Amino acid sequence: MTQETIKTKQDKRDRRIAAIGTAAVFVGLVAMYALLTDVTKALDPVLFPGWGVILPELGRSSGELFKGLYYSMRLLLPSLAAAILAGISVGLLVGMHPKAKLVLMPLFRALNPFPPTMLIPYAIAVLPSFWLSSAAIIFIGVFWPVLMSTLHGIAMLEPRWIDNARCLQLTGRKLIFRVILPGAMPQIFSGIGSGLIFSFILLTVAEMFGAKAGLGFFVQYYADFAEYGRVLGGILFMSTVVVLIMTVFDRIQRRVLHWTQKR
Amino acid sequence: MNDTPLIQLHNLGFSYAGEQTLHGIDLTVNESEFVAVIGPSGCGKSTLLRLASGLLMPSTGEVLVGGKPVTGPGLDRAMVFQDYSLFPWSNVTDNIVLALEQTHPALSKAERRQIAEEYLAMVGLAGSEKKLPGELSGGMRQRAAIARALAMNSPILLMDEPFGALDAITRARQQDMLLDIWQSGGSLKKTVLFVTHDVDEALILAGRVIVLGVRPGHIAADIAVDLPRPRSREKSVNSDRFRALRNRLLHELDLAVTRQLEAASEVREGSGI
């Protein structure tokens, strides 16, 4: 057996043990909640319903939850895609033109930290539909981190890659897609990651404000009726969705950036 | 070998941030010549190569390639850097294919791939075609970089300490490989400008060695390496002529370094007053 296969076997075993540990902690937390609610009723049963209440509520609401999920995704995914595309495009355009960058960078720095939630009331007043105003808020929230990280990624490109590209006389689309984008991808992905997390916050906030559907609306709606079994069910459902989206994101990131681990 | 000048440096000078790194360089490299440039660190030998490549523009004088002034990098000059001629996000085949897209735009995808694989096999990398540069050892990476430069089929090869980061045994193997490939080129021999800080490497490979002096960088000596070709490391290294050339080169380098130290101490004394 070679050194390498021993290493990967050891690696696999370590990872399996870690996964078992994670599952154990998760089961422990679930059991602890059961102990505090279902078993001992130590917590207020109205605000903290036990699993015996939450799970049947989850089952009963599943139709509503999946409909909410559909509405949330119909809002989230196009806004995310548009913001990522726009952030990278503007980043490339500005990052590849030093003069434009010098002019615009101070403005970007000033606008970047502005909280998009401040714009919600105004967006609702200005834009014709709830979907459009929420989409605009999510767009702004994701656009900035993607733009800034793209600019950062381009600024961090190693001079030797640029030398290499110049020696091969790469220009235009080839220069962008074969050198600049792949080279800046590690930073761009970290920007997309922050944007993604921020987008969940903005999505639920927007839905709690003025929506008639979606997962944020579901939680807000049943909280108004003090149906906390459904509220907790909705929160659990939403967390599962977030975990799934982040898992898909991590997979994509690992695939695209797999060269960074081999350097 | 013929005597048609291919690379001409005329009164070349380069300054950066007020400091002159090269001054009054006059050098002509003929077609199919293998010229090594050697000198102590800080003599501007890498700068010289970057000027020839067009990555840098001279402050004074000019670089002519085939009689035409160089205004930027060109595909007629393939560059091999010390350890970074390949993009780390593409496997070695794709790296070569990208270069071939530029130099051979008329070829089909399959043909480019085939050429890339041929050259990888030529440098002993058959079986590693799908590897990322980061998955290869330093020596293998440099072989892939040389494969790329050769596949481009540029008449000129510019090599900036290509084996400088390798251990002694790997370096010797790479030198032998480059020597074999270059000598088997026949009448289609590439013109090579090869920067190194290794005296033996310069003598084993080159037909002519340029010694650069320092402060500012200038040509201190231009020595013909009259060892018979085709050469092999063994025959060269064990010949008396090699030893004589080696002593002469070391002497020239020693002079260059001594002058550098003298110049440095003069500056220090001067600034003390």
Image (cartoon, rainbow, N blue to C red):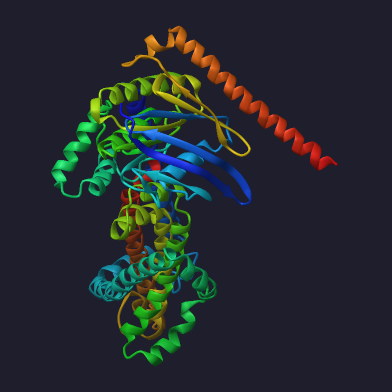
In the depicted view, which residue is nearer to us: B110 or A156? Answer: B110
Residue drawn where x is 34% and y is 33% of the image:
B191
Q: Is residue A244 left or right of residue A112?
A: left
Residue A128: x and y in percent read 32, 91
In the depicted view, which residue is nearer to us: B143 or A237? Answer: B143
In the depicted view, which residue is nearer to us: B146 or B249? Answer: B249
Q: Is residue B273 left or right of residue B44?
A: right
Q: Quadrant of the N terminus of chain B?
A: top left
Residue drawn where x is 42% and y is 77% of the image:
A205
Numbered-mark total? 0
Please identify the quarter of the rendering in which residue B188 is found.
top left
Please identify the quarter of the rendering in which residue B94 is found.
top left
Q: Quadrant of the C terminus of chain B?
A: top right
Q: In this view, does A249 lie to the left or right of A109?
A: left
In the depicted view, which residue is nearer to us: A44 or A137? Answer: A137
In the image, residue B219 sits, relative to residue A37, either above or below, namely: above
In the image, residue A25 sits, relative to residue B40, either above or below, namely: below
Residue drawn where x is 34% and y is 30% of the image:
B3
From where the camera sits, is residue A104 visible? yes
Residue drawn where x is 41% and y is 42% of the image:
A18
Residue A210: x and y in percent read 37, 86
From where the camera sits, is residue A194 visible? no
Residue B5: x and y in percent read 36, 36
Which residue is situated farthest in the front direction here?
B3
Which residue is situated farthest in the right direction here?
B273
Residue A53: x and y in percent read 35, 68
